[in-house]
Amino acid sequence: MKFRNYLVGGFVTLLLISFASSMEIFAQRTGILQVGLNRIEGRVTDEVNNGVNNVYVELYDNYNSVIGRERSSGQGRFTFRGMGPGRYTIRVKPYGTNFAEDEREIEINNQSSRSDIVMVDFRLRPDKRASQDELGVVGTVFAQDVPPAAKRLYTSGIDRIQSRPDDALAALKEAVKLFPNYFDALAALGKAYIMKGKYADGYPFLLRAIDVNKRCSDCYYSLSLAFYKLDELAAATKAIDATVILQANSAAVRLLQGIIYRLNNDLAGAEKALLLSKSLFSSPNPEVHWQLSLVYNKLKRNPEAANQLEQYLKAKPDIKSAEKESVTNLIGKLRKK
């Protein structure tokens, strides 16, 4: 498979390739009493009141447990329904954007009505921190004069990407037909195909998206994953290196870089990337320890490989008994070598 050179410069926030609907099903926590039609509605905007779409909005109860999660719509709106009376916290988590997290506390009391409606809006401010523990879910901000019909198709596709994925992809394709240089639609199509495991179908849209917006860091990350899955390691290396230029202090980016470097037999580079990834994650990540164990085993540093496998088990408390037994046996073999 031949790929053209798509490595270009630019410095923007790196974003997660994951691509889901703008609304997720509200998950009601067991034990919460449903009262009437209680509802929490709100909007997430930037500093100039533009809606911020596709960011996570989470609802927490008084015990700090998540009882609902969804994505903001194309206009930045979100809604939670069916909660009982009590105090709640709403948190907006705009991972991968230039915005800082925000939260609000609200109360539903049902004193005068069994159908309380609480309105709460968020105006996000820039996040001055240089690094993040994980990649985000929002697309790169890129302004275009988009024809209204194409914009409607794009919004329709985003809103249905999880509930009706085939219809969503069809709508996004139609948006691109109407406006071939529609960056948001091109990037969305590429990421949607990759999430479905259709890597060969997804990467051409991402290349076209980069042609339009040469600072699309999430496109590079998506390409690196697609090429890695397609066993095109040379192309994957170029893509992940471009992503690192754009976001050097992303734990997830460094993890993927370590994996790709290991497969390319650049063991020194893989170790460096994985150790950096380990330091950037806010909590132990089992995949980092697993990948480090593979690197150290190939370097014939078996005691260190065994240490990483032990940390892997500690970082994965929900591991199945069969896997735990297998990993434990492997640790024993590495200790004997």
Image (cartoon, grey):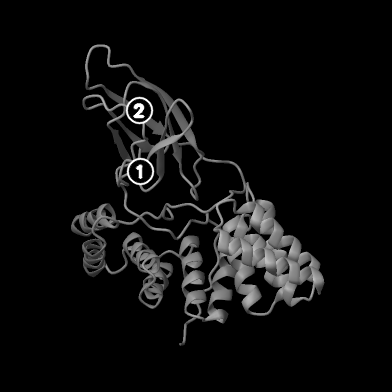
Q: In this orientation, which residue lies closer to the viewer: 319 or 210?
A: 319
Vertical relation: 105 (above or below) 78: above
Q: In this orientation, which residue lies closer to the viewer: 272 or 141?
A: 272
Quarter location, residue 81:
top left
- On the question of residue 268 being in view, the answer is no
The three-letter code of the residue at mark 2 reads Val
**In the displayed structure image, the side of residue 163 where residue 248 appears, left or right:** right
Q: Do the residues under discs 2 and 1 have CB atoms within 8 angstroms?
A: no
Secondary structure at numbered mark 2: strand
Furthest toward the top, the residue is 112
In the picture of the structure, the residue carrying the numbered disc 1 is 70
Furthest toward the bottom, the residue is 1
In the picture of the structure, the residue carrying the numbered disc 2 is 120
Quarter location, residue 176:
bottom left
Image position, residue 1 (x, y; %): 45, 87
Question: Looking at the image, is mark 2 or mark 1 nearer the viewer?
Answer: 1
Q: In this orientation, which residue lies closer to the viewer: 212 or 57?
A: 57
- On the question of residue 173 being in view, the answer is yes
Q: Image point 40% across, 39% down: which residue?
A: 57
Q: Earlier in the sequence, mark 2 or mark 1?
A: 1
Vertical relation: 252 (above or below) 181: above
Image position, residue 139 (x, y; %): 41, 55
The three-letter code of the residue at mark 1 reads Glu
The quarter in which the C terminus is drawn is bottom right
Image position, residue 64 (x, y; %): 48, 30
Mark 1, other Cα within 10 Å: few <14 / some 14–19 / many ≥20: many
Image position, residue 315 (x, y; %): 63, 52
Secondary structure at numbered mark 1: strand
